[in-house]
Structure formats: C-alpha cells, structure tokens
Amino acid sequence: MALASLLNPKCSIKLSVFIIPHISSSLFSSLCRDREHPHFSPPQQTPPIPKKVPFTVSAHGRTWQDPYHWMSNTNDPDLSHYLTQENSYAEAFMADTQHLQRTLFSEMKGRMPTSISTPPERWGPWLYYQYIPEGKEYPVLCRRLDTEKSGWLNTFLHYARGGFGREEPLLDWNKIAEQYGYVHVGTCRISPDHNFLAYTLDITGSERFMLQIKDLRSGCVVSNIEVDGVVSLAWAQDGNTLFYTIADDNQRPYRQGYSVQN
C-alpha cells in the first residue's frame, strides 16, 4: 500500500499541498542570495548584445522574422567575436566563484576512480575492451587474445608471432586529440575476420563524421578513403566490404555507399 500510494499522482499532489508550505519563489531566491552570496556584486561590463539581421522564414503556410538566422553560419567572423564577448562576460560574472569552482572540481575529481575500464567482450578468439589511461581524458580501444576459447592451434600461432597474452591497442582517442585538438569518435565496427577497424571521426565539433578504416594487421589507416558525413557502418560477412550511410545537409541519412578492402 505504501508503494502504491507513492506511485499515485493524486497522493503526491496532496502531499505537496498539505505538507509543504507555499513559499514565494522570489522570496526563496532572495534568501539564497542573502545567505550564500552576501557580498555579490555584478560585473561592471554589460551583457553583450548580438546584432540583428532581417531575415524572413516561411514554412507550412506561416511567415515570421528570424533576426538571428545569421548565427547558423559558423564561419561568420561576427559569430566568433560575439561568442568571445559572451565568454568574457561569463568569466567576469562568475569571477567571485573561482574558489568554489576549484573546490568542487577537486572534490569531483577525487571521487573518480583512477582506472576506468569496460568489461571485456568476447568475440571470436579475441577479448575487446576499452579503458581510460590514468591522467588522460579519452579512452583507448584494445583487444587481447582469449587463450581459453581460441584453441591450441590459434594460441600457438599467435604466440609464434609474439602476441601471446599481449594487449593490442587498436584506437587511441588521446593521440587523435593531441594531433587535432579535438576528437569525437562516433561509431566503431570490427570486421568479421578481425582484420579491419572502421570508425567515424569528428575533429572539428561540427558533428560531421568522416570515415576511417584501419588495417589491424599493419596498424596503418587506409589512405584512399575520403568519405564525409558518415552516419552508420556495417561490415559484410566477407570481412572486406564495408557499407555505410551518408547524411545530407540536415544531418539525415539519405544515401548508402560501400568500400572494398584488399
């Protein structure tokens, strides 16, 4: 009965009406400001005001004005200038909370484990997993031969190649971030024969992902693949053919392509 009463929306309304007294939101905000920020003073500079450019939008039989449509052009230098002003104003506005920000950051960082990894996922003779190296921001995709399930012959051949029990890094997000300053890996797909790794990569923050294929036998990225705006990936059973979908300008998948590896 207790659980049923908690899940009953009518009961929750009665609790809020009869148990919780009504307090004006403005009064509550004033009390919080007085107690937590007794010496708060707003920054001297005024909030930045973006420019307005007349622009008419029509859709579904309706027409309206959108004076901020110019912000959709991320290459507009006025947009970069405006964002810089906004950041400067935000830093000035929050200047009196710098000590609190550092304290909160230290507390949250201290609660995070030094080693973060995913459970290994067995696929064929391999165990695939990810982990975040200590002091790093991005994960590393790795694999290790599963000697218990691979059979004595595969284990012996892998040992002969010098790979027995050895961790094999497949994709290091941190190295990509060091090269480009930013990285967002969208999708990763291992080929059925475990020889290729296909993944999508965004290095600009535009959410437009380019296709990358890595030959896991040589450790090299296939250089003749130049496909942008990739959404999803799927390997064929032959292990050499990769299918992918491409997005249009509205970020909607509209075309399918394929690439054949040697």
Image (cartoon, rainbow, N blue to C red):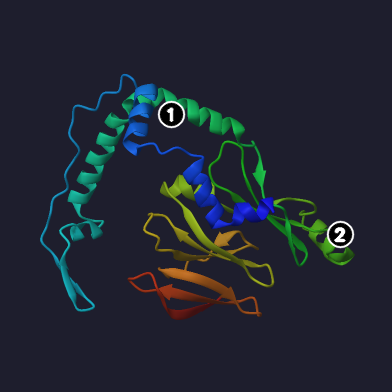
- Is residue 196 depicted above or below 49 in this figure? below
Q: Earlier in the sequence, mark 2 or mark 1?
A: 1
Which element type, helix, strand or loop, lies under badge 1? helix
Task: Tell me what residue is drawn at x 47 percent, y 60 percent.
Answer: 201
> In this view of the protein, can residue 262 be seen by the observer?
no
**Cα separation between marks 2 and 1:** 49 Å
Snapshot quadrant of residue 262 = bottom right
Horizontally, residue 14 falls left or right of residue 111, namely left
Task: Tell me what residue is drawn at x 23 percent, y 78 percent.
Answer: 60
> In this view of the protein, can residue 159 be seen by the observer?
yes
Task: Tell me what residue is drawn at x 73 percent, y 55 percent.
Answer: 120
Horizontally, residue 117 falls left or right of residue 160, namely left
Between 51 and 9, the one lying in front of the other is 9
Between 169 and 86, the one lying in front of the other is 86
Q: Residue furthest front?
A: 18
Q: Where's residue 15, x and y in %? A: 53, 46
Task: Tell me what residue is drawn at x 34 percent, y 71 percent.
Answer: 250
Q: Where's residue 260, x and y in %? A: 55, 78
Between 223 and 188, the one lying in front of the other is 188
Q: Which residue is mark 1?
A: 101
Which disc, if any, is residue 148?
2
